[in-house]
Image: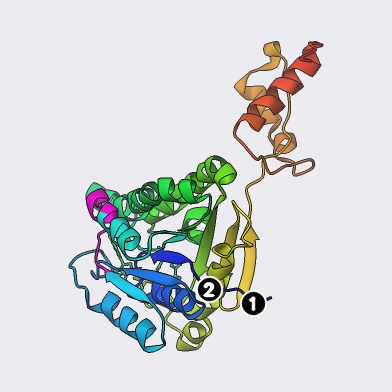
Amino acid sequence: MSIRFDGRVAIVTGAGNGLGRTHALALAGRGAKVVVNDLGGARDGSGRSSAAAEEVVALIREQGGEAIANGANVASPEEVSAMVAEAMDAWGRVDILVNNAGILRDKSFAKMELEDFRAVMEVHVMGAVHCCKAVWEIMRQQQYGRIVMTSSSSGLYGNFGQANYGAAKMALVGLMNTLHLEGAKYGIHTNTLAPTAATRMTEDIIPDPRVLDLMTPESVTAGLLVLCCEQARSRQILCAGAGGYAQARIYETDGIYLAPEQQTPENVLAGWEELSSSQGQKELLVGGEQTMKFVAKAAAALGISLG
Ligand code: NAD
């Protein structure tokens, strides 16, 4: 089965360079009309230029595709609204949103200025929030939408020197979880990509050119297309890099129950091994499942029937 996007309209943020560029080219190559958004700044978010987005649009048009360049700063809700209005004026719908734009301000937490923390949160988290908010009602009305967040192993697992970036990247998983729940009855599927690829973001972290050669953006884009196609599941975290594809998941252990008179820090500490045991661990589908699990354990221990 071939994956196609004919008749679909996609917005890819930060699509002038790196992963966004290959995402936009691939979506257009498979039939989507694409808004190629890029602020065109440096890796730390400074500066602005429309050249990179325009170059990607020119490439798409050369290959017979349809695209428009847009220079909105995703951190500005007004600029994002204008971008979505431009897509609606041109093509009358928005089916796919790929939140990909990002910047880096790496420093150890001890040396990091609050401004570097805020700037990273603004682009990654609020940038994605602004874009989701601007397309949400359109997707609800259409009863169709595919939204992809771009997270990172730095958010999922941590990375030295990236407290700001890691916090922002994990916040996007939280955003996905709730948009997945709220979008389900409107046909809006929200997923997350955790990529690793050779781009200007990683060029000085991985100096070996042989490794960089394996980490093509195209290999990541193959996974991205699955997250935004019609058959896409929802609330999936797809990890992709160098031709490897895997899924990240969050589990909660079954845990222990302590009776009221046993609820002391000493007993919680003593029970640590047991409460951490992976036996019976589960992926919870909504926050309330955690409450119900604990309440059910307490009720059972106290002989209370909750019906
Ligand atoms: P990149 O720097 O090559 O591309 C990011 C693009 O986003 C740039 O073209 C930049 O101009 C644009 N951008 C930055 N701020 C913007 C803003 N405010 N508004 C609009 N556009 C803006 O980086 P990349 O490696 O292609 O990264 C793409 C995404 O993937 C980012 O979210 C990044 O955090 C994530 N990521 C990348 C890697 C990797 O290995 N490259 C790993 C994990 C996550």
Residue at disc 2, secondary structure: helix
Colour logic: rainbow
- Amino acid beneath label 2: Val
- Identify the residue at image location x=42%, y=50%: 138
Residue that label 1 marks: 2
Q: Does residue 122 sit above or below 106 in this rendering?
A: above
Residue that label 2 marks: 220
- Identify the residue at image location x=42%, y=47%: 136
| Disc 2 residue: CB within 8 Å of ligand 1 | yes
Residue at disc 1, secondary structure: loop
Which image quadrant shows ligand 1?
A: bottom left
Q: Is residue 302 visible to us here?
A: yes
> How far from the left and from the top, in percent, is residue 73?
25, 59
Q: Quadrant of the N terminus?
A: bottom right
Q: Which residues are magenta?
A: 70-81
Crowding around mark 1 (Cα neighbors within 10 Å: few <14, some 14 to 19, many 20+) is: few
Left or right for 13, reference 277? left
> How far from the left and from the top, in percent, is residue 187?
57, 50
